[in-house]
Image (cartoon, rainbow, N blue to C red):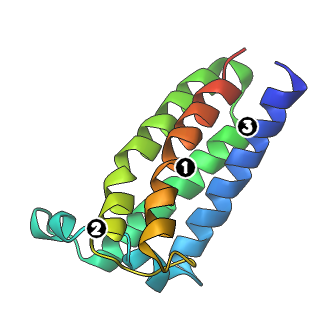
């Protein structure tokens, strides 16, 4: 694996662990802005439970990106990419409903963030391939 891929995998893993810890602690309220109203309507979960659950998943995925043995990394990268796709509706909801969080306090900033999600998907896949 190239040094660039390894660096990207470690950076992505570290960012996921940090984001997951933020979900569970200091940024919990901010993350609630990204929970689509529809998620609360069609599940028995509260907004806070969705935030906590996604935080636990992010810590687990980030840890797996950092620690998985080489033969497992491709699978972990695919799961991380799928997770980034799965949380996209939250980002879309934040934009459509004009919810401020994480400095995304204008329509343009919230919309611009949507284009970052494919970058995360690509990074998860690219950084875990040989």
Quadrant, the C terminus: top right
Picture layout, residue 7 above or below residue 101: above
Residue beneath disc 3:
9
Task: Say which quarter of the image contains residue 64.
Answer: top right
Mark pair 1, 2: CA separation: 16 Å
Neighbor class of circle 2 (other Cα within 10 Å; few <14, some 14-19, many 20+) is few
Pointers 2 and 3 in contact (C-beta within 8 Å): no
Mark pair 2, 3: CA separation: 31 Å
122 to the left or right of 28: right
Circle 3: element type:
helix
47 to the left or right of 40: right
Q: Residue at x 76, y 38 (%)?
A: 8
Q: Which dot, 3 or 1, sits closer to the camera?
A: 1
Q: Horizontal and vertical percent for residue 51? A: 40, 70
Quadrant, the N terminus: top right
Residue beneath disc 1:
116
Q: Residue at x 78, y 28 (%)?
A: 5
The mark that comes first in sequence, 2 or 3, is 3
Picture layout, residue 70 above or below residue 30: above
70 to the left or right of 125: right
Pointers 3 and 1 in contact (C-beta within 8 Å): no
Circle 1: element type:
helix
Q: Which mark is residue 96?
A: 2
Nearest the camera: 84 or 72?
A: 84
């Amino acid at each position: 694996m190239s040094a660039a891929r390894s660096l990207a995998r470690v950076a992505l893993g570290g960012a996921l662990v940090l984001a997951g810890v933020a979900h569970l602690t200091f940024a919990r309220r901010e993350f609630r802005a990204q929970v689509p109203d529809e998620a609360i309507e069609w599940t028995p979960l509260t907004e806070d439970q969705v935030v906590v659950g996604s935080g636990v998943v992010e810590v687990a995925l980030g840890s797996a990106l950092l620690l998985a043995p080489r033969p497992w990394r491709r699978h972990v990268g695919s799961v991380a990419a799928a997770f980034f796709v799965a949380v996209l509706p939250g980002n879309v909801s934040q934009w459509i409903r004009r919810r401020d969080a994480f400095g995304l306090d204008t329509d343009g900033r919230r919309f611009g963030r949507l284009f970052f999600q494919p970058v995360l998907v690509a990074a998860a896949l690219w950084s875990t391939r040989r």
